Amino acid sequence: MNGLITVYRRELAGLFVAPLAWILLTVSFGLTGWLFVAMLENSGGDITYANRFTGGLSGVYWALMMFLPPLLTMRMISEESRNGLLEFLLTSPVTDAAVVLGKFFAAWTFMALFWSNNLIYAATVHGLGTPPDWPPVLGGYMGSVLVSGLFCAVGLFASSIFSSPILSAFAAMCGSIVMLMLPRLVGVYDSDWLTEQFVAVDIMRNFQTTFLVGLFDTQVLVFFLAWTGFFLFLATRGVEAKRWK
Amino acid sequence: MITANHLTRRFGPVLAVDDVSFEIGRGEVVGFLGPNGAGKTTTLRILAGFLPATAGSASIAGHDVQRESLEVRRHIGYLAESVPLYGEHRVEEMLDFQGRLHGMSSADRKRRIPEVLERVGVLDRRRQLVAHLSRGLRQRVGLATALLPDPDVLILDEPTSGLDPIQRMEVRKLIQDLGSERTVIISSHILPEIEAVCPRVLILSHGALVADGTQDELVASLGQGTHVRLEISAEHDRGTVEAELARLAHVLGIESRAGTDGYIEYDVRCELDLREAIGRHAQEQHYRIRELSWRKASLEELFVRLALGLQKDELQPSPEVTQ
């Protein structure tokens, strides 16, 4: 546990000393802020809709969701493996799992901070005298954090198996796109059985029909946590495999 | 303190470490010597718990490096050849991170960090970013990082590679000081490095341990003993001189060649230092002698021979006159 916290603190500090994190935060806050205001105007002041749009329905939201976690996690293992820092970590009294989890929680914390923009917009509107419908706002935030945790785990897994950060980011983006889009493409086949199977693992649908509408569903919570855990397990095995190369 | 039993490590078809066994006691300073690709780094990585062995076992402080890897890692300070450090951190932040990884308390870190930085001579750089350090300073900070948890065993992989001669000398001095307190293993392909610092040497070649002992033991047992060099006037018959010298006890062989100014150079290969006996013999025979000197087979000769797999007879005497 001590090792996990130490790695987490260092990774988080490492993220924020690099300009990438600040650039990402600035661009995304600017982009989603503009989107929120635009949707507020278009919907005639429907705060709940504007919030739901920027926090889970828009293409910009899903694009950010697919591209940011891979960019954050791409260096975490692959580059450290190349420059010897992974050797430094893995010869310290810290388990492989603690190293992977420390890095994961750092990326996840960043994403949690990243998605706080919707909370800030809602709080601002609330402060101006129009309280939003808080359960969907809070649910949407929680769901966003859960979905981005899953994609951070996918990114770490890719980083653990590729030696180039660019390659690992590309693989993680492709993986995220496949995970998001595959259940949507299944509809082109006229098969109830297939549709049923893929609906169960439809990330977008699971998020949009529960958390985003303010519904706390433990089944969906377990769904996200289980997949996240699965990819973290694979990432740990990937780190372990580096010892054999 | 350290035991390796038949350590073997393969990378696919490549046999990087081939059935290596040795024991290293507490407080020993041991040098791993071998050409590039001999298996030094792989062996050290196995000992440090980073690489698993394909076969065989190793233990440090009574803990198996594979099964009790975390316990082993608490006893060692390991500095990899690449000196991995986080460039975005300041020197003291890097050490603080290492201290936290080793579970050191805040009070311990506050006490130890200035102590080790002082020891390696970079206390005045503690607020500097690691990325802005020169190669030599990085190496020192790497050493400080390895030393911070006060390990029983220090494993240093090529600790002076990339340093200038003065920096090398300083790092050597530091390692010598450290050796008086703890077990130190150093790998290097640079002979003077090992000769200067390590009383005991393990020579690896093509993954196999080909020699293990103190420098003197190795040179005496595997080397060619000593060489006595003579320059005798050409007025004495070369064949007769050679035959008479060959009759002396402990002489292994003689080579001669024409020297300058009417002298002939004789290189007498012998098991012992025969200068006195040869001098006495030359006096009895009334040889006109211009030079009588002794050359000891060096670790370098032995290293070259073992690394290249040369036969004993192919060993050439060192040009260095040691006495």
Image (cartoon, coloured by chain):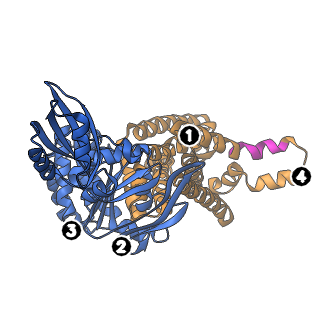
Chain under label 3?
B
Chain under label 4?
A
Q: CA distance from mark 3 to mark 1?
A: 41 Å
Seen in the image, is B301 located left or right of residue B290? right
Amino acid type indicated by mark 1: Ala
Residue beneath the point at 67% across and 57% down: A210
Task: Please tell me how crowded label 4 is: few (under 14), some (14-19), or many (20+) other residues with Cα within 10 Å.
Answer: few
Looking at the rendering, in which quadrant would you find the N terminus of chain A?
bottom left
Q: Which residue is mark 4?
A: A192
Element on which disc 4 rests = helix
Examine the structure image and report whether residue A136 is included in the region drawn in magenta: no
Q: Which residue is mark 3?
A: B107
Q: CA distance from mark 1 to mark 2?
A: 42 Å
Seen in the image, is A245 located left or right of residue A129? right
Display colour for chain B: blue
Q: Which residue is mark 2?
A: B61
Q: CA distance from mark 4 to mark 3?
A: 65 Å
